[in-house]
Image (cartoon, rainbow, N blue to C red):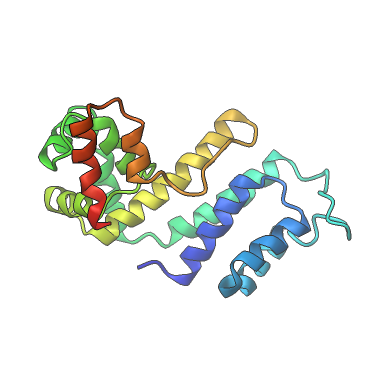
Amino acid sequence: MSTKNEEVNRIVLAFLVQNPRPTVSDWKALIDAHRDFAADIAEISLDHGGFGAAGDHGEPDVKIDEDRFNKSVSWVLNQLHGRRSAVLDKAEEKISLVKGASVRNLAKDIGIGDYPSLLNEVLTGETIAPVRILFALERSLGIARSTMVEVFQRSFFALEVSAFKASGVKPEVRAQPRSWAESVGELSLPPEERARLLDFAKDG
């Protein structure tokens, strides 16, 4: 289970990706949206100039540049990675080795069938895995479901940060991964196959 600090860091990381140059109003809105973590978010914002980076009217400070943004994101990532346990490291390494033919074989083994791209989106955190898929992955990979979910979440946020750095501009990013139904819907499938895959999500 995630600690309070890890949850706060995830919230702030997602916020920084969506708002490379946050104003005072942006930080206040974030705090209002997460009242349970208000004090922690406020402290982080102060550490990174959140309430000193804008004037009284919430206008962004023109001195805030991409380098500052990258440093802020790196700081949050370091906080996350600093709490990585040996179990998470081992699980992440094991999942990272599932590629190419391994993805195709695993997709068949767990019942997804001839749609390795769907499994690949699960492994990279881009698609939320239904409970039945998580159980199947747990049996095949020997990794606890809770650990896999944690690895998938980290991978998703890492992908969004990489997208920003690669493009050099604020990317169009999702606040959350796609649902299983959304990802299945994007595949060109015959009706019976679509129904079969969607059935995985009936139990959540």
Residue 158 seen in this snapshot: yes
Q: Please name whichever residue, 60 or 90, is drawn nearer the observer in this view of the structure.
A: 60
Dividing the picture into quadrants, the one containing residue 148 is: bottom left
User: Is residue 102 rendered to the left or right of residue 169?
Assistant: left
User: Is residue 18 rendered to the left or right of residue 102?
Assistant: right
Horizontal and vertical percent position of residue 106: 15, 38
User: Is residue 144 rendered to the left or right of residue 38?
Assistant: left
Tell me the quadrant of the picture where the N terminus can be found: bottom left
Horizontal and vertical percent position of residue 71: 63, 48
Q: Please name whichever residue, 2 or 173, is drawn nearer the observer in this view of the structure.
A: 173
Work out whether 204 lies above or below 181.
below
Tell me the quadrant of the picture where the C terminus can be found: bottom left
Horizontal and vertical percent position of residue 112: 18, 38
The single residue placed furthest to the front in the displayed view is 191
User: Is residue 92 rendered to the left or right of residue 160?
Assistant: left
Residue 49 seen in this snapshot: no
What residue appears at the point 35 percent right and 37 percent down from the top-left corner?
A: 183
Work out whether 33 lies above or below 135.
below
Horizontal and vertical percent position of residue 188: 30, 25
